[in-house]
Image: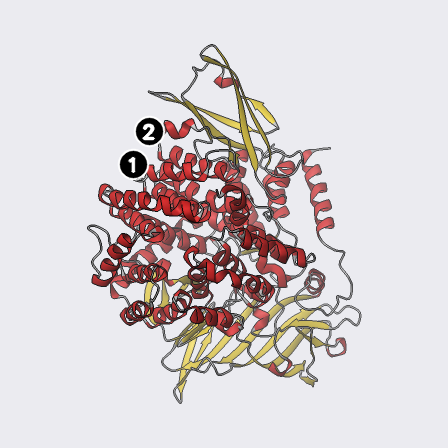
């Protein structure tokens, strides 16, 4: 049978196994089941929403709304129509169908419309309602709608599934001094009795999760993008940051837009551009066409921004602009393929930002930006595949994480290498044109790419996309005299005994005193002889995956450490740092203390900023997670001294800032405390170290953890902060950082109430201080309740919050008592939600490894 035919058969079998058989009459159950979604997809089309919302200035007052939903309906049997609305019955005021007022019925999160009121063809349903607040993110003076993945139904009645795209006509009535933005262009404005009514043009075709608006006391700035007047709304008050950032923000946006239009061959696919910059935004950004949301702290930077901060800004903007094609114009059928929009957004962002830099810079950024994050999940017993099973959209938020944001771009890069860059581009462009303004699945894309390559994408797809985990890649070398006789590479899964192999490319380098020999490897099976290395002189050491493209745990010799001065290339060094750390975690390389010494010794020698950031991160993790308290205290003096001396040795300002941040993060001595307190009190940083207001806030919090009576210090820092949004954030965090046990207890107990978790970004940061290693003796008793409330966190929080909740809590614990609390919880809940269980296993992986590694 021809390969294409085999692939088609595979896709049919995969999808039939993945999805339950469609039922003619879906049950009325909470969420949006796959069966309900399929039923509605087969019966509804040409959907339009006309929404009117009256938004009071006070966030405590409810928002009233009316809507008209029109659609073409294919009536089937006597099945009722279910419209999603996850609110209290009292929020549903009235319902009329085709002009007839009917009894309001809200059952299991659905407005029920009996079949007798509907007809085949055109229908109109009018609903008056009180809007739910859950996804409206109402803060003092502003709000923003964030409906991904299935939270539009928490605000207004709708068909909340990604493959029912619709047009939205929005009217907002807001306080006169407020501004607002939406997906559609602003059509007209009227003012009456201190209220402003804004009517927006009908939007382009969008799924519910991309419908959005923001309104509030924002500043407005307008620039031209593609000859259009395009607005950015923001609340930043630091004039230096605004002046330093605004031109860069729009330049990065325009450059990304230009790159994607050229790469895809498709012009910008939506009617307008628009940006909203949100303080304490719980994501980096969100890609609503015409109203893209961005995180304030990532976009607005001062003149002393580090290269990492600049990279984060350019990547974020490029990521969100890429979504306009990947996710917005072509949307996944179902949220099991949410990773498709994210992988392309990240992968294309890497391409667009890399287009303006040399290949070394691009490769190093890709390596340090994606691999450690992907490994942080894929190395755990809770690792999930890129493409996951999803039965109901109420669980869609748990699909997100480093696997789709970081492993998937690595996978996509390997796919591009496999089929060739030109063929890959042709296939993706064909896919975009075929499914423009519609929906598609991963099998749809694979089917198209399959036509552009003779490679076997079926087996490749299984191990890279449908299975979790990574390979362990070893090698065996035999010498004849002083020359290599045989060099064999082998691979096996990190866990389990299943026979599977990751087809991929990477590089091996042989290091000699005066040269480096490199060979490119295309690994496909269980083991492979590398004939190109036969006859090569015996090297001082061998570095697998020296180019940093390969994925897995690569055997790394200890000789790499002793001869590391020979590793001149920054990418080689980054790959070696990552491999040494991963081998340490697996117990197959150096022990934590030895690796800590090596990384510490590298501090004055490593002058590449991204690498310095990488190893200081590893130093912090090893220090707090994998050294016993006694060993930490013995090591702290040496590390503090080395960091402070390195601060003088490093010449680049960005590198100095990285070293200072590391010093601030791990110090324990009284001398270091006095030193840093003087810097904070006088607001005079060390020479050539630039600290802004946020840096001094972080320094105050670091000092507070080492201060037995820190109320005065925290109050003084609070008084220094002038921006009202940052004041509100600090007020949350300072409770968690307080030296008063009762204040910390009250803070944690307050988090059991949903309203106290509304600012998820601030709460996540606060939990990091609450559970800091220096506080864990008094914070460990919070762990049981942290786990008990996790399902509630998942139901009420945004998509990244459950993972943030767990990682901010468990990241630095290492004690057997903490490990036992996790194990007892899992034993007590054998039928626990499997996706949430995986999140727990991911977040507590370092805790598990610490039971073996901490001596």
Question: Mark on residue 605?
Answer: 1
In the image, is 498 to the left or to the right of 315?
Answer: right
In the image, is 723 to the left or to the right of 189?
Answer: left
Horizontal and vertical percent position of residue 286: 47, 61
Determine the residue positioned at 71% across, 76% down: 113
Horizontal and vertical percent position of residue 300: 32, 60
Viewer-proximal residue, 286 or 135? 135
Which quarter of the picture shows residue 105? bottom right
Determine the residue positioned at 47% across, 31% down: 545
Horizontal and vertical percent position of residue 516: 38, 23
Horizontal and vertical percent position of residue 826: 64, 56
Determine the residue positioned at 23% across, 58% down: 679
Question: Mark on residue 565?
Answer: 2
Viewer-proximal residue, 520 or 260? 520
Q: Quadrant of the N terminus?
A: top right
Q: In what element is the residue under mark 2?
A: helix
């Amino acid at each position: 049978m021809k390969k294409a035919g085999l692939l088609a058969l595979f896709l049919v079998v995969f999808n039939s196994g993945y999805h339950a058989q469609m039922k003619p009459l879906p049950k009325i159950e909470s969420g949006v089941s796959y069966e309900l979604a399929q039923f509605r997809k087969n019966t509804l089309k040409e959907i339009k929403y006309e929404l009117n919302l009256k938004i009071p200035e006070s966030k405590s007052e409810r928002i009233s709304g009316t809507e008209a939903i029109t659609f073409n309906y294919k009536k089937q049997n006597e099945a009722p129509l279910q419209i999603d609305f996850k609110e209290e019955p009292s929020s549903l005021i009235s319902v009329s169908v085709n002009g007839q007022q009917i009894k309001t019925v809200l059952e299991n999160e659905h407005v029920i419309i009996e079949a007798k009121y509907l007809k085949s063809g055109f229908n109109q349903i009018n609903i008056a309602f009180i809007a739910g607040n859950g996804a409206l993110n109402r803060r003092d003076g502003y709000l923003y709608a964030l409906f991904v993945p299935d939270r539009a139904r928490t605000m207004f009645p709708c068909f909340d599934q990604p493959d029912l795209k619709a047009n939205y006509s929005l009217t907002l009535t807001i306080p006169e001094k407020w501004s607002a933005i939406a997906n559609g262009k602003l059509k007209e404005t009227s003012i009456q009795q201190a209220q402003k009514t804004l009517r927006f043009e009908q939007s382009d075709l969008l799924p519910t999760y991309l419908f959005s608006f923001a309104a509030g006391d924002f500043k407005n700035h307008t620039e031209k993008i593609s000859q259009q007047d395009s607005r950015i709304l923001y609340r930043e008050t630091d004039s230096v940051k605004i002046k330093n950032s605004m031109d860069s923000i729009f330049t990065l946006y325009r450059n990304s837009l230009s790159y994607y239009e050229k790469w895809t061959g498709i012009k910008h696919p939506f009617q307008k551009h628009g940006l909203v910059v949100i303080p304490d935004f719980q994501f980096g950004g969100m890609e609503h066409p015409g109203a893209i949301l961005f995180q304030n702290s990532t976009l607005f930077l001062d003149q002393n921004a580090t290269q990492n901060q600049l990279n984060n800004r350019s990547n974020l903007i490029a990521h969100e602009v890429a979504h306009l094609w990947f996710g917005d114009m072509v949307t996944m059928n179902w949220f099991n393929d949410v990773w498709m929009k994210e992988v392309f957004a990240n992968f294309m962002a890497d391409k667009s930002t890399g287009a303006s830099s040399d290949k070394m810079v691009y490769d190093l950024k890709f390596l340090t930006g994606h691999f450690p994050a992907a490994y942080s999940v894929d190395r755990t017993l809770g690792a999930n595949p890129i493409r996951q099973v999803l039965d109901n959209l109420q669980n869609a938020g748990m699909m997100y994480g480093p696997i789709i944001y970081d492993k998937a771009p690595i996978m996509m890069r390997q796919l591009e290498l496999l089929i060739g860059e030109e063929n890959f581009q042709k296939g993706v462009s064909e896919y975009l044109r075929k499914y423009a303004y519609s929906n598609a699945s991963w099998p749809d894309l694979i089917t198209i790419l399959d036509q552009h390559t003779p490679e076997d994408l079926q087996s490749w797809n299984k191990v890279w996309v449908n299975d979790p985990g990574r390979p362990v890649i070893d090698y065996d070398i035999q010498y004849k005299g002083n020359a290599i006789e045989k060099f064999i590479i082998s691979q096996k899964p990190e866990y389990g005994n299943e026979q599977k192999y990751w087809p991929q490319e990477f590089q091996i380098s042989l290091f000699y005193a005066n040269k480096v020999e490199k060979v490119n490897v295309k690994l496909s099976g269980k083991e492979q002889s590398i004939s190109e290395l036969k006859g090569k002189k015996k090297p001082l050491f061998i570095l697998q995956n020296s180019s940093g493209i390969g994925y897995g745990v690569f055997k790394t010799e200890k000789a790499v450490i002793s001869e590391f001065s020979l590793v001149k290339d920054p990418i080689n060094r980054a790959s070696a740092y990552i491999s040494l750390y991963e081998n340490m975690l697996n117990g197959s390389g150096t022990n934590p203390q030895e690796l800590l010494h090596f990384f510490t010794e590298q501090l004055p020698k490593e002058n590449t900023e991204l690498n310095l950031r990488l190893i200081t991160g590893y130093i912090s993790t090893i220090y707090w997670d994998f050294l016993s308290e006694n060993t930490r205290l013995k090591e702290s003096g040496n590390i503090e001294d080395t960091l402070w001396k390195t601060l003088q040795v490093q010449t680049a300002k960005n590198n100095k800032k990285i070293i200072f941040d590391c010093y601030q993060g791990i110090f324990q001595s009284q001398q270091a405390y006095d030193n840093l307190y003087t810097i904070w009190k006088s607001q005079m940083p060390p020479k050539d170290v630039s600290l802004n207001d946020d840096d001094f806030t972080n320094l105050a919090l670091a000092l507070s953890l080492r201060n037995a009576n820190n109320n005065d210090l925290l109050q003084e820092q609070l008084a220094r902060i002038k921006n009202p949004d940052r004041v509100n954030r600090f007020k949350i965090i300072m409770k968690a950082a307080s030296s008063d046990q009762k204040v910390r207890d009250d803070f944690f107990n307050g988090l059991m109430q949903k309203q106290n978790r509304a600012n998820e970004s601030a709460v996540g940061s606060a939990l990091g201080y609450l559970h800091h290693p220096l506080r864990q003796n008094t914070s460990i008793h919070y762990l049981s309740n942290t786990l008990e409330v996790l399902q509630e966190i998942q139901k009420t929080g945004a998509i990244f919050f459950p993972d943030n909740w767990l990682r901010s809590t468990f990241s630095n614990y290492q004690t057997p008592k903490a490990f036992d609390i996790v194990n007892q919880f899992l034993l007590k809940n054998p039928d626990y939600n499997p996706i949430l269980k995986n999140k727990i296993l991911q977040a507590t992986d370092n805790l598990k490894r610490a039971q073996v590694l901490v001596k």
